[in-house]
Image (tube, helix red, strand yellow):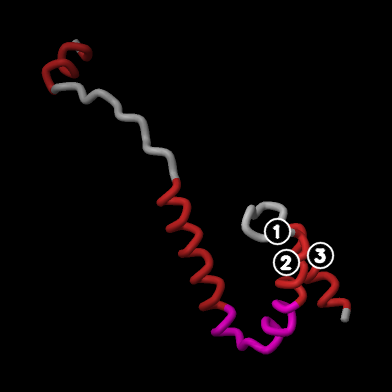
Amino acid sequence: MFGKVIGAVAGAQAAKHSAAIGGTGGALLGAVAVPLVRRLSIPALLVVGAGGYLAKRAYDKRHAAPAPKTARRSKAAEAASKA
């Protein structure tokens, strides 16, 4: 029972960072996630964690701001600046 309450609180807090899920929805997801995680094996937990990590990296890469372009210097300009 305490696990479900803690999961619900954690889910509600995580839902504050998401526009798609409200506080109540996050609390429900957190309460449901606790018994599911308890039944998973260690390899399954590792696969789920790695999948979440890779999905987050792909999301961040897709939504990242483009890097500013820098002017390339020619070899002659570099040699002139060193002399």
Q: Quadrant of residue 76?
A: top left
Q: Which mark is residue 71?
A: none
Which residue type does callout 3 highlight? Val
- Cα–Cα span, label 1 and label 2: 8 Å
Q: Residue at x 46, y 56 (%)?
A: 59
Q: Which mark is residue 25?
A: 2
- Cα–Cα span, label 2 and label 3: 11 Å
- Where does residue 49 sit, x and y in percent of width and height? 56, 72
First to last magenta residue range: 32-45
Q: Which residue is mark 3?
A: 9
- Cβ–Cβ below 8 Å for labels 1 and 2? yes
Furthest residue to the left?
Answer: 76
- Where does residue 16 sit, x and y in percent of width and height? 72, 53
Which residue type does callout 1 highlight? Ala
> 27 or 47, which is in the foreground?
27
Which residue type does callout 2 highlight? Gly
- Where does residue 73 sit, x and y in percent of width and height? 20, 22
Q: Residue at x 85, y 72 (%)?
A: 5
- Cα–Cα span, label 1 and label 3: 10 Å
Q: Is 38 above or below relative to 51? A: below
Q: Which mark is residue 15?
A: 1
Decide which of tag 1 and tag 3 comes sooner along the chain.
3
Q: Quadrant of the N terminus?
A: bottom right
SS category of the residue bearing label 1: helix
> 12 or 66, which is in the foreground?
12
